[in-house]
Image: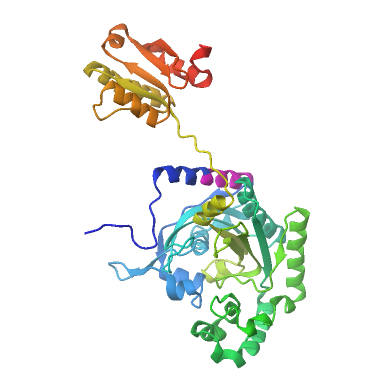
Amino acid sequence: MSMKAPRGTVDILPQEAKKWQFVEDRLKDVCGRFHFDEIRTPLFEHTELFQRGVGDSTDIVQKEMYTFEDRGGRSLTLRPEGTASVARSFVENKMFGNPSQPVKLYYFAQMFRYERPQKGRMRQLNQFGVEVLGSADPAVDAEVIDLAMTCYQELGLTSLKLVINSLGDNESRTSHRQALVDHFSPHKDELCNDCQIRLDQNPLRILDCKVDRDHPAMQNAPSILDYLNEESRSYFDQVQNYLTRMGIEYEVDKNLVRGLDYYNHTAFEIMSEADGFGAIATLAGGGRYNGLIEELGGPSTPGIGFGMGMERLLMALDAESKEILIDDQLDCFVVAVGDEAEKEAVHLLHELRKDGIQADKDYQGRKMKAQFKAADRFKAKYVLILGEDEIQREIVNVKELETGEQLEVPLSQLVEKMHEMLLGGIENE
């Protein structure tokens, strides 16, 4: 029987994982500068959370969720997105009562969506996201967009396109909804089955359809921007003014709607325009979701956030030929020959590691020559040689592989000397 990873999942092997760690560290650093704190939520939630929080009419809820019953007969779902879980945690843990508002959070999380696997779209995906809960200030919208753009720019990406739109408040959306129904109803039989259902449930999502996007009715569909009331228009203008003040370039896309039901006011996407990136160009997307917290049983609390696909971020780095420099050198490798030397090597490794020095040894019983080859494979900076003679004299022969320089160091002084040599090299001793 052939055992392979399930369709739509991949293994992240050690060398690739180092790239992920590098990128994650950069994103965490940006979040720290923006004064965001990390949150970690469960891998699965009660199914109702996503039905209520994401929306029954969305593709995620209707087609893509991994849902199962536990032994108690409860319906549970592997999380398909991050915002609903963060919102649930915000309500359950009464974070709305924190004296410091708004609450600014970020997360790294695995998501699960049953969809057709393709490049940049997997069934198990990794997402970085941020949420700000507790402020309706348009400056917060601009800050969240700024954070997302800063993350990409800190990693060296330049072929980026930011598009924004306003979905308006409830009054504006109600007016726009009726206009969409009036516009698409004469063409209902020409639309795909999903859009025929959306026409009744959530006509705004017709504008996001990939099947009907070339239908002539799409080209002249009513724009939400023509139905914004004074308050919504003022809000959108303020967001744009803040982005302009920060020097962040953007385009307004009147057809940009987000695939989740909880969005209102600001919506945005960041795309890669790098050559060869592929058809799925969206790197991140998000927007404002005033009303979600109330839907989940909390007090009236405005919110905004975004989700960023980690796989697509790494694809964008490859597309722009941005090399991630990984320091995979080993500080030192212990070469031991003889039973007593082997015993001392185990002790040495313990002392070196305890003092912050990266160290390893051979565990295959290899001869000295083979151990040196292993040190080369690990790109060790130094080889610490222990044999019968060294044990009797209570010293270690330290060899710098790059220069070939060698030095005898008393066992009792090895840790201190290694720190000095890792900073300056043997030639400076």
- 295 horizontally vs 224: left or right: left
Q: Was residue 27 drawn as part of the magenta stretch in this picture? A: yes
Closest to the observer, 40 or 414: 414
Closest to the observer, 131 or 89: 131
Q: Quadrant of residue 238?
A: bottom right
Residue 99 appears in the picture as rendered: yes
Residue drawn at x 65%, y 86% is: 178
Quarter of the picture holding the N terminus: bottom left
Residue drawn at x 77%, y 74% is: 230
Q: Which residues are magenta?
A: 23-33
- 343 horizontally vs 183: left or right: left
Q: Quadrant of residue 143?
A: bottom right
Q: Was residue 288 drawn as part of the magenta stretch in this picture? A: no
Residue 410 drawn at (x, y percent): 38, 10
What secondary structure do most residues of the magenta stretch adopt?
A: helix
Residue 414 drawn at (x, y percent): 40, 15
Examine the rendered structure and indicate whether residue 74 appears above or below residue 270.
below
Examine the rendered structure and indicate whether residue 248 appears above or below residue 221.
above
Total labels: the figure holds 0
Closest to the observer, 112 or 87: 112
Residue drawn at x 56%, y 48% is: 37
The outermost residue toward the top is 393
Coloration of the structure image:
rainbow
Residue 20 drawn at (x, y percent): 48, 46
Closest to the observer, 178 or 218: 218
Q: Quadrant of residue 265?
A: bottom right
Residue 272 drawn at (x, y percent): 61, 58
